[in-house]
Structure formats: structure tokens, C-alpha cells
Amino acid sequence: MKLFLKFIRQYSGTALLFAVFAGIFAFVFSLYALEVEAVVYAALLCAFVAVTVTVIRYIRFRMEYQKREELLRHTELLNEHLPEAQTPEQEQWLAIISELNEQCRQADMKLRSEKTDMLDYFTVWVHQIKIPISVMHMQLDDADTPENRAISDELFRIEQYVEMVLCYFRLDGNASDLVSEKIQIDAVIRAGLRKYAPIFIHKKLRLDYEGTELTAVTDSKWLGFIIEQILSNAVKYTNGGKVTIRVSDDRTVMISDTGIGIAAEDIPRIFERGYTGCNGRTQHKSTGLGLYLVKKACDR
């Protein structure tokens, strides 16, 4: 019904003009005192032709409308499936659309190339920056002092931020970095726990995890990143108590802690990029990127 109303509005000018012409003819016929029968007969013939033409035009209008709707859903096929121009005006519009589409394609190719170059640069940068970090770790391990342990914790945090930069660019690119396979969830969880073991020890946090036999078809690297980010938040905002990892009967992995928690008003926005929340602003420890990247990885 809505489409038919759009059709009526589009051709309302033609219909009005037709009505004006019909009125003129009726007026002229009345001046010459023609028989009413002849006038009615002519009017019925005209009405029949008008209805027939209107139906044909509406069918064609609906088919063309549906084609355009399909093109809107698949804009990548725009140039190959544009309808043929019927008027000089349509020719101009099609030329404008083709030119704009080509400009968008060129801009997209340029953007993709620049993002690829940037990702390559940061990949090299991440590997290069890890070398001095590893050297500093080895030097700090030579003397086990409270000061060295504190510095080591900060170096570990720097490593996490470096990895986060690379993950940020990879997640903003295409999905070619994803490799799905059947994996043991327990292995991914334990790898994350080993990574954060020094922080657990330094902060004297207890761990409550009994293991799991759960398997899943997923990308082990990105699932590991997701779990590590949640563990990072758990140990970052927990100064005493424990971190608990449970796998429920409905195949859900749950990570909880006895830390300061999240303010109720912050919960709807925790996955927004750059949003740090009340705790992040108070303690100046949050970048507002961790859970944003977690959400993007989960969506992928």
C-alpha cells in the first residue's frame, strides 16, 4: 500500500493534467450540445485506457523499485546492475552515480592500503619494542627486590599495552586473521593464568579454578586475548581476595573477582571505545580500550 501511494504521488501531476483536459473536453462538448451518451462513451473509453496504462506503469514502477532496493542492499554491484537510462535526465544521474561510485572505490582502496601499511609498521614496531622490554625483565630478575618486582609489574603492563595496539589495528581490518578450529578451553585459560601468575603472586591474590573439559570451535588466539583482557581487569582492580573462574553447565565461562566492581551507571557503556568509567578515572589505570576490543573480538 505504501509503495502504491508513492506511485500515486509520483504521477499525481500527470493525473491532474489529465483531469484538467477531461474537464476542458466536457466543457467544450456541453457548449456544442452533444449527446450525453456520446460524451459518456468517450469518457469510459478514456478511463479504461487510463486504468490500463496506470496498471502497466505501476507494475513497471514496482519492479524497478524492487531492483533499486536490491542495489541498496548490495552497493558493491552498483555499477554492474544500474538500470538503463530512459531519458537525458536519467543519463546524467547515472553518470553522476557512476562517477561517485568510482571515487568511493578509489578512496576505499587507498584507505585499505594505508591501513595495511600502518598494520605492517606496528607489527614490526611491536616486535622491536619487545626486545628492550625482555632485556629489562632479565636484568630485573637478577635481583628479587620489592622495587624490582614493582618495576617488573609496570613492564608487564607496558607489554600488554603494546599487544593491545596491535590487536586494535588487526580487529579494525578484515577477518583474515581469524582461524577457527576445535580447541580445549582449559588450555586457553591456563595460558592466560600463566601470563598473569607474577601479578597474582605480587598482589597475593588467590585463584579458584578447577579446570574444564569444555571444547569449542573458535580462534584460540583471539579467545586467549579476550580471556586475558578480562583477567587483566580482574587483577588490576582487586587488591585483596581472589579471582574465580567457573564453567557452568550451559557452557559459559565466568570470571569473577572480589575487587571494587563496576558502578551500575557505567555498565551500559563499558564496551564503548575510550570509556573508562568511574573506577578508571579515579585510579588512572584504564585506557578504555580493553573491553572495547573484547567486544569487537567477540563479535568477530
Image (cartoon, rainbow, N blue to C red):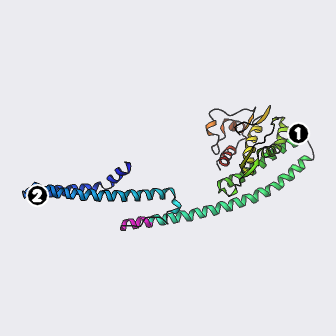
Left or right: 156 as drawn, with respect to 56: right
- Residue on which the image places disc 1: 146
Above or below — where is 185 with respect to 179? Answer: above
Nearest to the observer: residue 237 or residue 181: 181
Horizontal side, residue 16 vs residue 215: left or right: left
The outermost residue toward the left is 33
Among the two numbered marks 2 and 1 on one chain, the one whose residue lies closer to the N terminus: 2
**Mark 1 closeness class: few <14, some 14–19, many ≥20 residues within 10 Å:** few
Q: Label 2: which residue?
A: 29
Q: Where is residue 112 in the image (x, y as percent from the top left)?
A: 62, 61
Q: In this view, does 264 lie above or below 131?
A: above
Q: Which amino acid does label 2 sit on?
A: Phe
Tell us which disc is closer to us: 2 or 1: 2
Residue 95 visible in the snapshot: yes
Q: Say which element carries label 1.
A: helix
Picture quadrant where residue 170 is located = bottom right
Disc 2 element: helix
Instruction: Check contact, mark 2 vs mark 1: CB within 8 A.
Output: no
Which residue is depicted at the point 58% across and 62% down?
A: 108
Front-lying residue, 131 or 82: 82
Asked if residue 248 is positioned above or below residue 177 in the image, the reply reads: above
Give the residue type that dot 1 points to: Pro
Q: Looking at the magenta stretch, what is its main secondary structure?
A: helix
The magenta stretch spans which residues? Answer: 85-95
The one of 147 and 59 positioned closer to us in this rendering? 59
Rendering quarter of residue 166: bottom right
Q: Which residue is drawn at 48% across and 57% down?
A: 70
* Res 7 quadrant in image: bottom left
Q: Distance between the residues labelled 2 and 1?
A: 110 Å
User: Is 86 inside the magenta-drawn segment?
Assistant: yes
Q: Position of residue 286 (x, y in %)?
A: 71, 42
Disc on res. 33: none
